[in-house]
Amino acid sequence: AQTVTQSQPEMSVQEAETVTLSCTYDTSESDYYLFWYKQPPSRQMILVIRQEAYKQQNATENRFSVNFQKAAKSFSLKISDSQLGDAAMYFCALTGANSKLTFGKGITLSVRP
Amino acid sequence: GAGVSQSPRYKVAKRGQDVALRCDPISGHVSLFWYQQALGQGPEFLTYFQNEAQLDKSGLPSDRFFAERPEGSVSTLKIQRTQQEDSAVYLCASSPRAARTPFSYEQYFGPGTRLTVT
C-alpha cells in the first residue's frame, strides 16, 4: 500500500517571499513518481512539478523546486517569489506501476499582499 | 485543444436518488481514472479504465457505485440510492498511455462534479 502524509493543514506566506510545503510518503515499490498538484477554487487539478524516484537531481520548474530525500521518504515543495496567484490547495501525490495516484490531505496556502 | 470535461458541474440529489456523472476525456486518451474528493481531503482513487476495459475497481466504496466506458471514450459514473456520505467532488482524469507503460503517470484532470446529497 502507498501512503502520502501532509501534516500541515495551512500555511501563509508574504508576497515575494519563499515558502516550503512538506510531504512524506511510503511505498514498497522501487520505481515510482512523486508530484505536487495545485487545486484552486475552480477545482481544476493542475500539475506543478514531477519527480522521478530514480533521479537524484531535484526537479525545478521556474519558481517551483523540490527537495527530494529518498532515504527519508520526504518530498517538499519550495515556492520562491510567491505570487497572489499561488494561493490554492496543494496536494502531494505518489504513483507507482499501476499509475493510480495516491494523494495527501492537502495544504491550504494563502499569500498575503 | 480541448481538455477533460465533466458534466454536470454541480448536482444536488435527494437521498435515495440515482445519479449519473459524465466524463469526456481528451480525444484518443487510452486511460481514464475516477477519483472521489471529500470536503477538505485529497482525492481518492475509485476506478481505472484502459480503453473500454475496467481493469481496476478496487476503490469503489460499495456496490451502489458503477462505472462504464462502453466505447473507450466517454465514461459514466453511476451512483445508485445515493447516501449523504456520497457527497463529494468526483474527478475524472485521462492519460494518453496505458498503465504500466512508460510515462503513464501523465494524468489530465477535469474540473470535477460536485455532488451534494440532501
Image (spheres, rainbow, N blue to C red):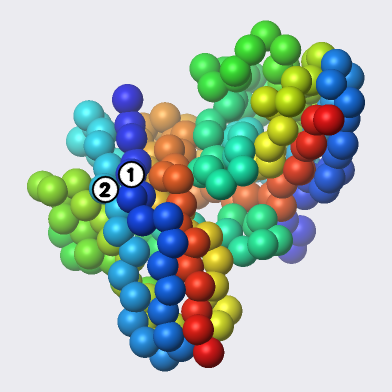
Residue B74 in sight: no
Judged left or right of residue B77, residue B48 is left
Where is the N terminus of chain B found, in terms of image quarters? bottom right
Cα–Cα gap, marks 1 and 2: 5 Å
Image disc number at residue A5: 1
* In-front residue for pair B104/A88: A88
Q: Looking at the picture, how far across and down is residue B33, in whole percent?
A: 60, 34
Image disc number at residue A24: 2
Q: Label 1, secondary structure: give it.
A: strand
Where is the C terminus of chain B found, in terms of image quarters? top right
Residue A41 in sight: yes
Quarter of the image for residue A41 reads: bottom right
* In-front residue for pair B84/A16: B84
- State the residue at coordinates (47%, 34%): A100
Q: Label 2, secondary structure: give it.
A: strand
- State the residue at coordinates (33%, 31%): A2
Specify few, some or many for label 1: CA neighbours under 10 Å numbering under 14, 14-19, or 20 or more: some
Q: Looking at the picture, how far across and down is residue A24, in whole percent?
A: 26, 48
Chain name for mark 2: A
